[in-house]
Amino acid sequence: MFHVGLDIHAKRIAICALDEKGQVVHRSQVRSIQDMVRVLKGLPDRFEVCYEASCGYGHYHDLLRPLATRVVVAHPGQLRLIFRSKHKNDRNDAERLAKLLYLGEAPAVHVPSLEVRTWRELINCRGQVIAKRTRAKNTLRALLRSAGITPPKNPGLWTKKGLAWLRQLELPTASQQLRRDLLLEEIEGLIRQVRRV
């Protein structure tokens, strides 16, 4: 069985395969996931594979799982503790990952199921939309303060009545009114996005 280390980047992937004695039997660099899959399928024996967890690690895991006898996703923080080398490059990193896999010392992370990862992405997406909405609301409050206007406590500023009050509010300058209108449009659009998510 081969032990394969992958150093995956957006524009290139370094591949290093070790045989059962821990000797390098294949080394290459490809430019796409499709090329990586082609190289791995072309290996003359079964293989296990190891790569470092980064953005998209779940997708790579799902792609490699049907091809490899075992897929190990390595913990990047623990790898940095293991490899305190100044000679860091893709080729060396792929070989080091292969060696850790060969020795059974690759510090693995748990890879959640696709369903769990999808749910987390949705939660993250909602959090980002809410953060944008909060920034827009804070910017609108700052605009009111800069114009010397204190909003009423009743109705609340972000209720239907509060938003209607904001729309009808006369601000001192045309540019402030324009900014208020744009911010209200942004807030209303983001409210719709939160509901959609």
Image (cartoon, rainbow, N blue to C red):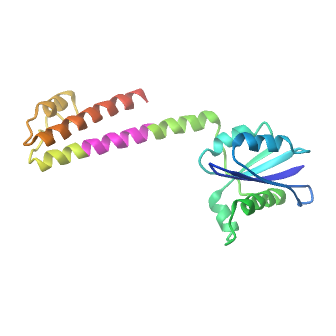
Q: Residue at x 38, y 32 (%)?
A: 194
Q: Tell me, yes or no, whether the highlighted magenta stretch contains residue 131.
A: yes
Pick the front one: 11 or 163: 11
Q: Residue 7's quadrant in the figure?
A: bottom right
Q: Residue at x 19, y 45 (%)?
A: 141
Q: Residue 14's quadrant in the figure?
A: bottom right
Judge left or right: residue 3 versus residue 159.
right
How many discs appear?
0
Judge left or right: residue 2 versus residue 65.
right
In x, y percent, where is residue 44? Answer: 91, 44
Question: Which range of residues does the magenta coloring cover?
Answer: 126-138
In x, y percent, where is residue 68? Answer: 81, 42
Q: Residue at x 65, y 40 (%)?
A: 59
Q: Residue at x 82, y 48 (%)?
A: 48
In x, y percent, where is residue 179? Answer: 20, 40
Q: Main secondary structure of the magenta part?
A: helix
Q: Does residue 183 appear in this view?
A: yes
Above or below for 55 versus 166:
below
Query: Where's the C terminus, which quadrant?
Result: top left
In x, y percent, where is residue 177? Answer: 14, 38
